[in-house]
Amino acid sequence: MIFFARRLHQQIIEKNSHLCIGLDVSPEALNDESQSIDKVIDHSIKVIDATFDLAVCYKPNFAFFERWGADGFKWLENIVDYINGKNILIADAKRGDIGNTAQQYAESIFDHFGFDAVTLSPYMGSDSIKPFIENPEKGVFILCRTSNSSAAELQDLQTGTGLLYEQVTKLSVELNKNDNVGLVVGATAPSEIKKIRELAPDLPLLIPGIGAQGGDLEKSMQYGNANGDAIINISRGIIFAGDKSSKAIRAATQNYLNQMQRIMNG
């Protein structure tokens, strides 16, 4: 048995990459007036074919699949089958519900779909997280200090023992009995990445917010990888690069990867 964090680390070393690619494909982003699911499916496969040897992880965002109903769930199943273990698959589902409901979500994401990890909301506390971390081979990334503009409204609130996101970090460390708990920390909050890494030196970090959201790649890489591993999620900057051709997608991917490697070697 390989614990999730160990498998992630092995993939990072073997590929010399910290890249996670978000699969957030919509007909609007493709400028497809026909609103065809076939075209978004074809584009998602194009992205995977152009990048699978460069990316450590793919992160399908469930919203972009659920909008299509049953056809979208079939597409999601086909994505998992198509990748077939070549890359780590993170379900960007942001689940977070009471224990018995969380158990059903865990069985859906891990057992039915076959994802390796999932994003979770910690708002309802540890019993909404524990069903997802029972299997050491499956991982979670808990929303901690996110990249969206209104994140500070709740996440930076002062509690009796520190800021709320700091409490989420400490709880996540306590829950990491099976070496399979990580955190989502936005690249738009580099000082928070540094603080979180100090509080959780060993937890994997999933860092979105590079590209369209204006996050700091250099600080994200430096702070995120100071002790444990960090993976950098990029979605629009890769999957809709240039003329959206395979060549443009791969060139954008290689460009981000080169930047990350220069920072790590710097």
Image (spheres, helix red, strand yellow):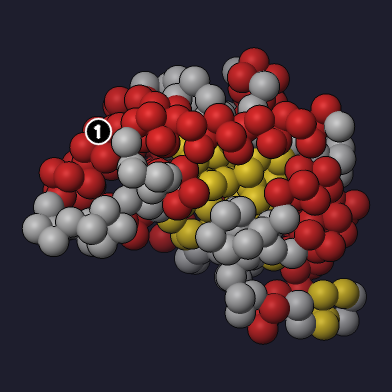
Q: How many marks can you see? A: 1
- Say which quadrant the N terminus sits in: top right
In percent of the image, x 15 and y 49: which residue is there? Answer: 37
Return the x and y of residue 137 as percentages of the image width and height.
57, 29
User: Percent x, y for residue 49?
Assistant: 35, 25
Horizontally, residue 108 falls left or right of residue 33, namely right
On screen, residue 60 above or below 86: below
Type of amino acid under label 1: Asn
Residue 214 visible in the shown view: yes
Task: Give the residue number, with chain letter if any, for mark 1.
Answer: 78
Tell me which residue sits at (74%, 36%) in the image: 229
Q: Work out whether residue 114 or residue 151 is closer to the camera in this orientation and state it.
A: 151
Residue 116, position in %: x, y? 49, 34
Q: Secondary structure at mark 1?
A: helix
Query: Is residue 60 in view?
Result: no
- The reply, left or right, for residue 31 in relation to residue 230 is left
Q: Residue at x 62, y 32 (%)?
A: 257
**Front residue (pair 90, 103):** 90
Horizontal arrangement in the rendering, residue 7 relative to residue 196 (left or right): left
Quarter of the figure with the C terminus: top right
Would you place residue 51 above or below residue 15 in this image?
below
